[in-house]
Image: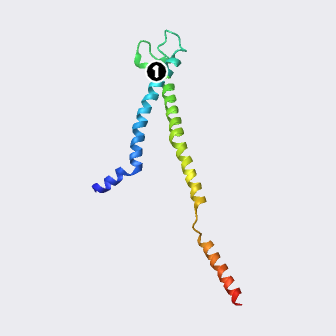
């Protein structure tokens, strides 16, 4: 059981996945800081100075009823930035690598197929029979 667990953990996919999760979490915090520290204040700048931000206060004097549209827009931008980086850094290069490997396998196939072997045997037998007769 321990050997099986060790093999599972040391398999390349699991280690790469663990690294990706750690790097993704760190990158996510950077993007979150960017959207909350830069993007949200820029969005809130379009509101009047008396407003707490880009949102709506449902009940006056009760802060818990404030709907913060800037936070929602910031979270959406956060998601889009992370998704775009994941696609451009991980998905796109891996798809290109798979395509290269696929082309390499198709072009590099040097072993003859069964049909090619049978065709060669047929042709050799035909030549031998023509020589005899």
- Depth check: give the residue in front, 70 or 107: 107
Q: Identify which residue is drawn at 46% across, 21% down.
A: 37
Q: Is residue 35 left or right of residue 10?
A: right
Q: Identify which residue is drawn at 42% across, 36% down.
A: 23
Residue 130 sits in which quadrant?
bottom right
- Depth check: give the residue in front, 32 or 11: 11
Q: Is residue 108 left or right of residue 55?
A: right
Hey, which residue is sitting farthest front in the picture? 131
Q: Is residue 125 left or right of residue 86?
A: right
Q: Identify which residue is drawn at 58% across, 60% down.
A: 108
Q: At numbered mark 1, what does the secondary structure look like: helix, strand or loop? A: helix
Q: Residue 25 location in percent, x, y?
A: 41, 34
Q: Quadrant of the C terminus?
A: bottom right
Q: Is residue 54 visible?
A: no
Hey, which residue is sitting farthest bottom in the picture? 133
Residue that carries the numbered disc 1 in the rendered image: 37
Q: Is residue 128 left or right of residue 18?
A: right
Q: Quadrant of the N terminus?
A: bottom left
Q: Residue 61 location in percent, x, y?
A: 41, 12
Q: Residue 98 location in percent, x, y?
A: 54, 51
Relative vertical location of residue 66 with respect to residue 113 in this rendering, above or below: above
Q: How many labels were placed on the picture? A: 1
Hey, which residue is sitting farthest top in the picture? 50
Q: Residue 21 location in percent, x, y?
A: 41, 39
Relative vertical location of residue 127 with respect to residue 6 in this rendering, above or below: below
Q: Identify which residue is drawn at 68% across, 87% down.
A: 129
How many residues crowd around disc 1 within 10 Å: few (fewer than 14), some, or many (20 or more)?
Answer: few
């Amino acid at each position: 059981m321990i050997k099986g667990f060790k093999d599972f953990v040391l398999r390349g996919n699991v280690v790469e996945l663990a690294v990706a999760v750690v790097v993704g979490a760190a990158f996510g915090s950077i993007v979150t800081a960017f959207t909350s520290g830069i993007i949200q204040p820029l969005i809130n700048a379009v509101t009047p100075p008396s407003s707490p931000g880009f949102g709506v206060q449902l009940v006056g004097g009760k802060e818990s009823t404030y709907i913060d549209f800037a936070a929602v827009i910031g979270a959406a931008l956060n998601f889009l930035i992370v998704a775009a980086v994941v696609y451009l850094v991980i998905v796109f290069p891996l798809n290109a690598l798979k395509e290269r490997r696929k082309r390499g396998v198709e072009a590099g196939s040097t072993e003859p197929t069964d049909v090619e072997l049978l065709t060669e045997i047929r042709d050799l037998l035909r030549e031998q029979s023509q020589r005899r007769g």
